Amino acid sequence: MFSAGGPRARPSLSAGNLMDEKKDEGRGFRVTDRRRFSESGEARGDTPPPEPSHAMPVAEEPRGSGSPAPHGIDEPVTFSTFLLGLSTQVLLHLGEIPNPVTGAVEPDLDAAKQVIDILGMLREKTRNNLEPGEESLLDSVLYDLRMRYVELVRQKPKEGT
């Protein structure tokens, strides 16, 4: 059973335990204050140079100058964010927004039509299976993208005439 002190009672300090603690003192780790400012807020001149890290370096993704840090990396993907990602791809292919890599507007109506068709397929396959907000978002995004596509196709000069 348990001792009189209960299951979480601390062991009593005996001479053997004290000796073990003294042995472990030398094997511990060293704490170094690397703060650049003192407790009063003044800059310290005695800051040691940074020590090399034993951790493996993390490769950084190349970003263009001035590009913001990616948002929501740890956020879970929801159906709504998935739809918004697909709609952004369509806007890119329609030439509504510039390519984030090249910065150029590169319309590709065939690719835009394909993603719009994927959204339409999602609409049919998820019918009566979505929350009202998701259904409304999908309907409005799909309508808007289809209208933009039709407008661009009508503006495009007929080839071969």
Image (cartoon, rainbow, N blue to C red):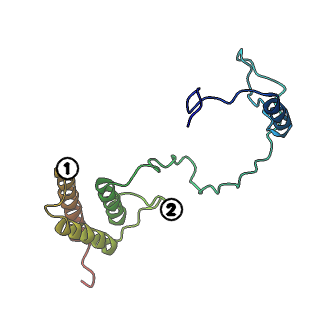
Q: Rounded to the nearest whole Å, what is the CA distance between mark 2 and mark 1?
A: 34 Å
Identify which residue is drawn at 17% across, 53% down. Answer: 136
Q: Position of residue 105 (x, y in %)?
A: 41, 62
Identify which residue is drawn at 29% across, 54% down. Answer: 80
Is 27 situated left or right of 116 in this image?
Answer: right
Residue 107 location, quadrant: bottom left
* Kind of residue at badge 2: Thr
Residue 139 location, quadrant: bottom left
Q: Which residue is mark 2?
A: 102
Q: Position of residue 49 (x, y in %)?
A: 82, 37
Identify which residue is drawn at 19% across, 49% down. Answer: 133
| Viewer-nearest residue: 81 or 64 | 81
* Kind of residue at badge 1: Gly
**SS under mark 1:** helix
Q: Which residue is mark 1?
A: 133
Is 26 situated left or right of 96 in this image?
Answer: right
Question: Looking at the figure, which quarter contains the C terminus?
Answer: bottom left
| Viewer-nearest residue: 14 or 39 | 14
Considering every residue shown, the one lying at the far bottom of the view is 160
| Viewer-nearest residue: 121 or 158 | 121
Considering every residue shown, the one lying at the far left of the view is 128
Question: Looking at the figure, which quarter contains the N terminus?
Answer: top right
Residue 96 location, quadrant: bottom left
